[in-house]
Amino acid sequence: MREPSAGRVFREHLSLVGRVGGGELGGFIAVAFLLCITAAAKVTATHSYADRVLGVQFLALVFAAYWPVVVWRDEPPRRRLHLRSLPVDPALAALLRVAAGGCWLVAALLTTNLAAAALGAAIGRGAEFLAITPLAWLAYGFGVAIVYLLASAAALVSDNPVRWIVLLMAFVYAPPLLLEVPSALHFTFRFGPSALYRGAFGFDTATRWAVTEAQLEASLAGFAVGRWLLASVVWLAATILLVVTAARRRPDV
């Protein structure tokens, strides 16, 4: 019997993930749109619409970390019956499912950002949102992709990925909340050298900082390519490698 093409398997995963996670996708879009409405209502002369809509981008990072749990909810590593039933290499099938989940994530983010732009235009502040440069959107995409891929690697190798994803989100969000902690204690709270977090190769530089600054300083010197590109490329390559390695894991059955 002829094996199905990778394209056909990908389409099957795309359909399956859409059915499994339709509720979560709809919930994310709904909450993001409510945040956009709140942002539009609070726009003032001193705060731009793009500034106020930052809550949507924080939500995007959280959802990117949570989404792999939904993508793999019906098939944890030790019960991956659907993947083993396909007449294709299980590692390839796993990667295709990660890619399918990524496509749905991109679709959800496009929907929310287009809605944000449309709402901004409706209140006469659309130019602020549309002024975000293509390079800034690239940084935004890199940041979200890194978080999604890192969480996907956890979902591929663990029957209980939530604890790893909670740790990931703590790594993304907790340190900015500790700015008042004495500098001598920053090493303890940040689980490693500051370069790993905020430096040229920093995880925060490639994710949270890039996503938020893409909204705030897209056309300013503070968002120069040299501030985020190196970290983004390094972390994106590392997370892709982690996902490929995790996809090749053979759990005991």
Image (cartoon, grey):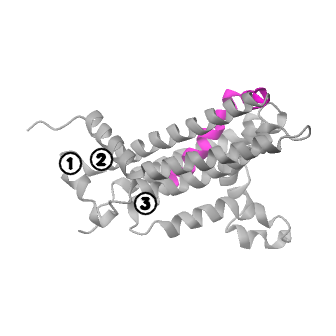
Residue 160 lies in the magenta stretch: no
Q: Which residue sits furthest left?
A: 1
Mark 1 — residue?
86
Q: Where is residue 76 in the image (x, y as percent from the top left)?
A: 34, 63
Q: Position of residue 195 (x, y in %)?
A: 72, 56
Name the element at disc 2.
helix
Name the element at disc 3.
helix
Mark 2 — residue?
93
The quadrant where residue 81 appears: bottom left
Mark positioned earlier in the residue sequence (1 or 3): 1
Mark 3 — residue?
155
**Which residue is at 57% across, 35% downward?**
110
Task: Tell me if mark 1 has few (under 14), some (14-19) or many (20+) residues whose alpha carbon lies within 10 angstroms of its own.
Answer: few
Give, as a three-letter code, the residue at label 2. Ala
> Magenta stretch?
125-150
**Which residue is at 29% across, 33% downward?**
7
Camera-side residue of 182 and 85: 85
**Which residue is at 58% across, 67% downward?**
167
Q: Position of residue 235 (x, y in %)?
A: 58, 48
Mark positioned earlier in the residue sequence (2 or 3): 2
Give, as a three-letter code, the residue at label 3. Ala
Residue 136 lies in the magenta stretch: yes
Residue 210 visible: no
Where is the C terminus found, in terms of image quarters? bottom left
Give, as a three-letter code, the residue at label 1. Leu
* Contact flag, marks 2 and 1 (Cβ < 8 Å): yes
In the rendered image, the vertical position of residue 6 relative to residue 126, given as above or below: below
Task: Tell me if mark 3 has few (under 14), some (14-19) or many (20+) residues whose alpha carbon lies within 10 angstroms of its own.
Answer: many
